[in-house]
Amino acid sequence: MTKPMVRFENVAKRYGALTVLDNLNLEIARNEKVSIIGPSGSGKTTVLRMLMTLERINGGVIWVDAEPLTHMEKKGQLVPASDRHLRRVRGKIGMVFQHFNLFPHMTALQNCMEAPVSVLGLTKQEAEGRAVDLLNLVGLSDKKNHFPIQLSGGQKQRVAIARALAMRPKVMLFDEVTSALDPELVGEVLNVIRKLGAEHDLTMLMVTHQMGFAKEFSDRVCFFDGGKIVEQGPPEQLFGSPQNARTRQFLNAVL
Ligand code: ADP
């Protein structure tokens, strides 16, 4: 059996006395597309932030591409990861946020070139070639010299996707990437994600409120409530015949 691309093994996350995730176990296969849905405050974003190492975990181990992310193997034992180890393994993961987080003083092209040059050590020429290809992929070749302030929300989010891809991640995380957009701009961003999923070798994990998209795009949907996966399954099953009362209640409220 091939190893999963991402594995949460008994992962716990607390903020002070508040337990946000309790004993989370979740495996995501190579190339699998998984959506996380659930009420506000149920821990969805925390799952992505832990994987991106923006949050330290309080228990368990996270594995990426058959390597521990949060830990290192030393003499056959797992010990907490050094910052260097975290940075290296985290390099396999790209994340796109709800609020774009583009560098405002850089053009679309410069936004996509910055990390490949400063983190991966590409030459400017190499990074520019890569950035041009990716801006083309997200349909923005004509906007490469625009600054974020000159772009619509949908265009900014497509630059953010190109910027994450410029690091050649194996796993892409999408955190409510259409939530801050005007309704008429949602489609262009979802189209880019759809295209990436169909044409690229990428494992994708997304937190979304777009139930229609989650249904159409995902191989598996996980319903979170109170820091736990209450129910998961293929979208037709989870949306079509949810087994758990809390899943049914949530879906009735949002669909
Ligand atoms: P969701 O994405 O499902 O809305 P989150 O993962 O953002 O939920 O948050 C889960 C819980 O953790 C919430 O109760 C939230 O208030 C709490 N939380 C998130 N970040 C912090 C933080 N930095 N400090 C304290 N509590 C936090």
Image (cartoon, rainbow, N blue to C red):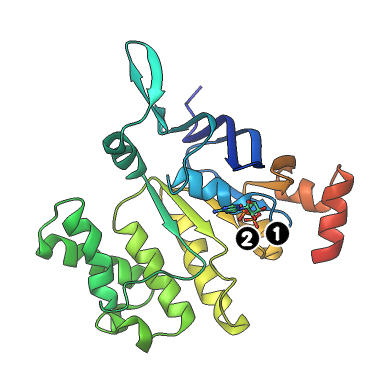
Q: CA distance from mark 2 to mark 1?
A: 11 Å
Q: Which residue lies most toward the front here?
A: 16
Ligand 1 within 8 Å of disc 2? The answer is: no
Quick check: 59 above or below 254?
Answer: above
- Decide: few, some or many residues near mark 1? Use Cα within 10 Å; few <14, some 14-19, many ≥20: few
Disc 1 residue: CB within 8 Å of ligand 1? yes
SS at badge 2: loop
Locate the C terminus by quadrant: bottom right
| Pick the front one: 149 or 55 | 55
Above or below — where is 60 with respect to 190? Answer: above
Mark 2–mark 1 CB contact (< 8 Å):
no
Q: Residues within 10 Å of mark 2 (few under 14, many from 20)?
A: many
The single residue placed furthest to the bottom in the displayed view is 150
Q: Is residue 89 left or right of residue 184?
A: left
Q: What amino acid is at disc 1?
A: Ser
Q: Which residue is drawn at the image coordinates 14% and 60% (left, top)?
A: 126
**In front: 211, or 93?**
93
| Residue placed under numbered mark 1 in the picture | 40
Residue 208 numbered mark, or none: 2
Q: Name the residue: 35% across, 78% down.
A: 140
Q: Secondary structure at mark 1?
A: loop
- Whether residue 255 is visible to the viewer of this picture, yes or no, is no
Q: For the point 48% across and 53% down, which residue is it?
A: 173
| Labels in figure, total | 2
The answer to whether residue 29 shows anywhere in this view is yes
- Residue type highlighted by circle 2: Thr
Q: Position of residue 95 (x, y in %)?
A: 43, 56
